[in-house]
Image: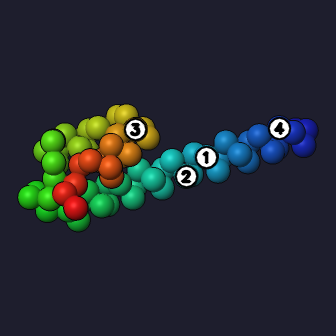
């Protein structure tokens, strides 16, 4: 493995870890939010959106899915 491939592999691994951590953060935050604090979708709808539309689902949830 050349040095360039090692750097690319490390960057891809770092990006993957960041995406997984972001998804876990969003799902944990959703679990701690009351049903009254959710907007636009039910809890199950937000779970599906967060998991299926990576990372846009999580961004949508954090931006508009909760009352402030």
Image quadrant in which the N terminus is located? top right
Looking at the image, the residue that sits furthest to the right is 2
Mark nearer the viewer, 3 or 1 = 3
The earlier-in-sequence mark between 2 and 3 is 2
The earlier-in-sequence mark between 4 and 3 is 4
Q: Which mark is residue 5?
A: 4
Colouring style: rainbow
Residue placed under numbered mark 1 in the picture: 15
- Asked whether disc 2 touches disc 1, contact meaning CB atoms under 8 Å apart, the reply is yes
Residue placed under numbered mark 3 in the picture: 56
At numbered mark 2, what does the secondary structure look like: helix, strand or loop?
helix
Question: In the depicted view, which residue is nearer to us: 24 or 66?
Answer: 66
The earlier-in-sequence mark between 2 and 4 is 4
Task: Give the Cα distance between marks 4 and 1.
Answer: 15 Å
Q: Residue at x 67, y 42 (%)?
A: 12
Mark nearer the viewer, 4 or 1 = 1
Q: Position of residue 59 (x, y in %)?
A: 38, 45
Looking at the image, the residue that sits furthest to the bottom is 32
Residue placed under numbered mark 2 in the picture: 18
Task: Give the Cα distance between marks 2 and 1.
Answer: 5 Å
Horizontal relation, residue 53 to residue 32: left or right: right
Mark nearer the viewer, 4 or 3 = 3
The earlier-in-sequence mark between 4 and 1 is 4
- Asked whether disc 3 touches disc 1, contact meaning CB atoms under 8 Å apart, the reply is no
- Asked whether disc 4 touches disc 3, contact meaning CB atoms under 8 Å apart, the reply is no
Task: Give the Cα distance between marks 3 and 1.
Answer: 15 Å
Q: Residue at x 71, y 46 (%)?
A: 11
Task: Give the Cα distance between marks 2 and 3.
Answer: 14 Å
């Amino acid at each position: 493995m050349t040095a360039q491939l090692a750097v690319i592999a490390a960057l891809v691994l770092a990006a993957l870890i960041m995406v997984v951590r972001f998804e876990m953060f969003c799902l944990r935050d959703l679990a701690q939010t009351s049903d009254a604090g959710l907007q636009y979708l039910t809890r199950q709808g937000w779970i599906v959106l967060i998991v299926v539309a990576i990372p846009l689902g999580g961004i949508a949830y954090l931006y508009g899915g909760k009352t402030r």
